[in-house]
Amino acid sequence: MSILRLENVMRRFGGLVALDSVSLEIKGTGISAIIGPNGAGKTTLFNIISGFNTPTDGRIFFGDHEITGLRPELIAKRGLVRTFQLVQLFENLTALENVKIGRHLHTSGGLFNALMPWIAVRQEAAVDRTSHALLAQVGLTSHAETIASALPYGQKRLLEIGRALAAEPKLLLLDEPAAGLNRDETHVLAELLRQIAASGTAILLIEHDMSLVMNIADHITVLDFGRVIADGTPSEVRQNPDVIKAYLGQAEAALA
């Protein structure tokens, strides 16, 4: 069953049509990818899905609920969480503190907790345990007390994913997670994404690394000039002549 559904989504910026009647469905399991050349509308699509932009027309559904035009924090509370193309961390906080911040959607405050301080203590202990477990999941256990600004770029990417997982997403949106990573770091990322998907969290990613996409994605949607030109398995997309012409090229299309 699909977890995310878009119906004829349009987005215009003045006279520029960034998205042109985009309709697609993302399954509630596995790894899906959106690819396309620069300027195809991929990040605009992510911004609209996650509430940072509103569509000019069309509707967006997450599970059984319409989320068109909802604010980002309300969409995140429903279980749709994203990362950004440029790493966005709290640079002056530790890795552990960054992940703890990601847990704020699942903690409570207010007068009741102020009157019952042991509840807040218990809640904080649970946040601490969960955050340490997430750091272990993304391979950053030894960097729990490291200030985020001191981490190498590849580890910052992993930390951002760990913080997003702290919000317990049903669908995790990743905007070019492999950007700036070397081959070894990309391999680590691929294994992490497979592990996340296997644990039951669906993933939708934008990515330019075609080798990564073809090796980990179960389903691929291709955008070109704001329109969907192909949709299917990696094998189907790889052989689609419109995709080869618009984006992949013969050499890339031959990737196993």
Image (spheres, helix red, strand yellow):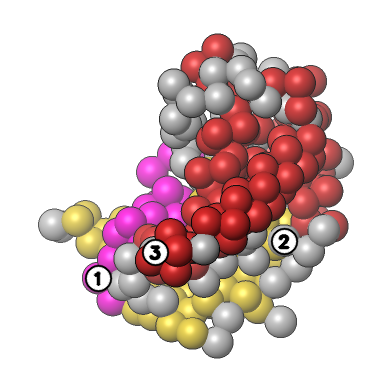
Name the residue tied to disc 2: 201
Cβ–Cβ under 8 Å for marks 2 and 1: no
Asked if the stretch drawn in magenta spans residue 207, the answer is: no
The residue drawn where x is 56% and y is 67% is 79
Residue 161: x and y, percent?
A: 62, 41
Q: Identify the disc placed on residue 56.
A: 1
In 3D space, how far apart are the residues under numbered discs 3 and 2 (Cα atoms)?
30 Å
Q: Identify the disc placed on residue 145.
A: none
Please tell me whether mark 1 sits on a helix, a strand or a loop. Answer: loop
Residue 119: x and y, percent?
A: 59, 60
Magenta stretch?
37-57
Q: Earlier in the sequence, mark 2 or mark 1?
A: 1
Please tell me whether mark 3 sits on a helix, a strand or a loop. Answer: loop
Q: Earlier in the sequence, mark 3 or mark 2?
A: 3
* Frontmost residue, 85 versus 148: 148
Q: Amino acid at mark 2?
A: Thr
Residue count near mark 1 (Cα–Cα under 10 Å), binned few <14, some 14–19, many ≥20: some
Q: Is residue 246 visible?
A: no
Depicted 42 relative to depicted 256: above or below: below
Name the residue tied to disc 3: 110
The residue drawn where x is 55% and y is 12% is 150
Q: Quadrant of the N terminus?
A: bottom right
